[in-house]
Structure formats: structure tokens, C-alpha cells
Amino acid sequence: MLSKRVKIALRILVVLLLLSFFVVTGVLFGYNYVIAQEKRFEVLEAKIADGSFLIDEETEGAVPLVIRQGDMTSDIADNLFELGLIDNTLVFSLMSKINGFDGAYMAGTHYLIPGLTYDEIMYLLTQKASSVYVTFPEGITYEEIKQRLHDAGLTFDDAEMDECMDSPNLFVDYRFVSQINLTEERDHVLSGYLFPDTYEFDINASPETIINTFLNNTNAKLYDEYYERAEAIGMSLDEVITLASLIQAESSRAMDMMYISAVFHNRLASEDEGFHYLASDASINYIRQMNGLDSHMVLTSDEINLDNPYNTYVYPGLPPGPICMPGLDAIQAALYPEPNCNYFYFCATGDGGTVFAVTQAEHDANVAMYQDAWAQIDAGVVETEPSSDEQEETPVEG
């Protein structure tokens, strides 16, 4: 008979052999699984590249899945289960870890269809999320921005967007936000700072994400030089952006902007308090838009005398905040007006141009010359010259 020690030794040997067998088997299985996985994903990648495995909002039966920033694999699995795209969240989570996909899923909106394998779902969720490109011309207003975003398919809630626009505490990391003049009269705190440009958005982007996208770009456009120049001319950057918005709304021509800026600077610096009223028709058009009315060139006496903080005929100095989103030309014009310019008046010619005057008499003569053209534009007989970004220019009298 075998001794007790021999029996123990044999048992240990058997256990070690079994363990070795399972380790070798596991390694071989894992190796074969990885090789097979790479081949499967190569096939998926090729199909996506040639468009044969394209799933978007127009695909029959497509189901949108939104991955939020910070979502864990378990959160994604729960959402997939609720949408009926998988039937076991634990298996999905384990396979995700084995496949090495944890932490690789892309935030945003993805489109899937029922019947996909777990591998296919995981691979698709690591691809770039569906998005849209939206272009915003210089001089666009906040209300127009919201409309363009909705027209492009974004699904944000307007009330939430408005709340974010009035919550500068959410965006304190941006230097320019700290200089914004917070007053009760201001219409949306961050208006003026959604820089006009072309942007890429996820259709289910949150209002905070949308605004951050704009402000990131704005921050990149506002060089240190602009802050230094603003201080040198005795203005805060917020006052510069507000002035730039008036300049932008007055003309889309860079050279005219510099002279228009000079007119406004001359008025603000004049010892004659009467010149402290900027008398910009652009501010009246902004009030019209706030009241849901169409903008036009000819002002009525009631509009000129309207008691509104944005009415630069009634209230001296700058309005409470920007009236539109100015571009770089307008911002630079606000910072660097045409030097040695003694103009105090300007008016639109009706064809996209601007004429300037030193005295009231010269200005009145210019207004008389071009007011018929303004009336024809208001009547729709003549159209104004479009700007380079195809936005309709609104010539106004200054």
C-alpha cells in the first residue's frame, strides 16, 4: 500500500497538473479569443469605412443612445438594457472589461439597432458620436442662435439654455466672465460672448455643454493684448464687447467699422453731454427684436423716445450689455478706432455703405439724401448688400 505521504504527494501532483491544464487552456482560449476579436473588429472597421455598417438617425429601427460625460460602463449597460438592446447587463459589463473597452466609450449620441451583438455594440460606442455642424454669422443675436441650433436638430430646452446664459457662476474659469457688468437691465448675462463661428455639436448636448463650446472659442479669440488695450483706453473688456456689438450691427465692412468706432469714442469722450447719447438705430432694432418685431431702417418718433435701457437715444453711454455677437473685426475696431478722426455722425447709404459727418448740418444733409433709399428698403423694393457671411446687413443711422 502507498504510504500516507505518497498519497498526499500524488494528490498535490494531480492538483498541480489540473491547475497547469486550466492555465494553459485559459491562455490558449484567451489568445484565440483576442485573435478572433481583432479579426471581428477589423471586419467591423472595414464595414464602417465603406458605409455598409452605417447606422444613423435615418436607419430603419434606429434607437438613439446618449452617453453622458462621466458615464460608467454599468450606466451604459443599464441604458442599453432599458432600450431593449441587450438582455444582460452583467454579461455586457464583463465582456466590456475583457475586450478592453472600459473607459473608451465616446460621450454623445449614438444610433444602434436591435439585434446587434455585444461586440458590435461595444465597437460602435467607441466610435465618434453623431454630431451636426452649425455656422453662426457675425452679428447674430442669442435668440437667433437658439433657433439655428434647433433647426440643426439640437434638442435642448430653451428655458434651461436661458438659465445657463444668466448663470456666469457656471463659467468662472473664463477670464472675461469676471469682467461682465451684472445689472438688472442686462438682457442675458453672456450675450455677446457666443463667438460667431462654425461649431460641431451633439444633437443631445446639454445647454451648459453648448455654451461652454462657444465660450472656449471666445476665450481663444480674446488675446491678452485685448485686455491690456481695453485697460489702456479706460474700458473694461465687457464695455469693449458691448461697443463692438453696436459697431457690428451698424456695418459689416471692416474699414467702416473703424470710423463708426471713432464716432462712438468721440461721443463718449466729448465734453458736450449731448454727444454722450450714441443714438444708434441698431439699439432700436435690438429692442424691436426683443419685442418680437421685425427690424427696419426708418425709425418712428415713438421708437426713438421709447423708455428702454437699450435705447441709446434716451439713455447716455453704452447699453447695459451687447446687442449681438460681434466678430473679430468689430472687436478690434472697438479697441482701435480710426485715429485722428473728428467725425461725430454717420448714416447708412442703403447699399451697405456708410457716410460720415462732423457737424449736425452735414449729417442732416446726408440723412435727407439717403432716407428715400431707406424707405424703399423697408418697403422691400430694394435689398441691402449682404455681408461676406451672407447675413443681411441692417444699415442704420448713427
Image (cartoon, grey):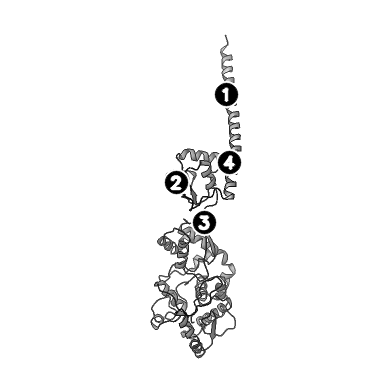
Whether the residues at callouts 4 and 1 have beta carbons within 8 Å, the answer is no
Proximity of marks 3 and 2: CB atoms separated by less than 8 Å? no
Res. 230 in view = no
Amino acid under disc 3 = Ser
Camera sees residue 295: yes
Picture coordinates of residue 69, whole percent (x, y): 49, 51
Q: Secondary structure at mark 1?
A: helix
**Spatial CA span between label 1 and label 2:** 41 Å
In terms of depth relative to the viewer, which is nearer, 155 or 169? 155
| Tag nearer the camera, 1 or 3 | 3
Mark sitting earlier along the chain (4/1): 1
Circle on res. 40: 4
> Which residue lies under the disc numbered 2?
79
Mark 4 and mark 3: span between their CA atoms?
26 Å
Marks 4,3: beta carbons within 8 A: no
Crowd class of label 2 (few under 14; some 14 to 19; many from 20; radius 10 Å): some
Residue type at the position of mark 2 = Asn
Closer to us: 110 or 184: 110
Residue at the top extreme?
1
The amino acid at mark 1 is Leu
The local crowd at label 4, few if under 14, some if 14 to 19, many if 20 or more residues have their Cα within 10 Å, is few
**Gap in angstroms between the C-alphas marked 1 and 3:** 53 Å
* Closer to viewer: mark 4 or mark 3: 4
Q: For mark 4, give the secondary structure.
A: helix
Going from the N terminus, do you reach mark 3 or mark 2 first?
A: 2
- Tag 4: amino acid: Arg
Counting the numbered discs, the total is 4
When the figure is inspected, residue 371 is found, relative to residue 389, above or below; the finding is below
Q: Which residue is mark 1?
A: 18
* The label number, if any, that marks residue 131 in the structure image: 3
Spatial CA distance of label 4 from label 2 is 25 Å
Q: Is label 4 or label 1 in front?
A: 4
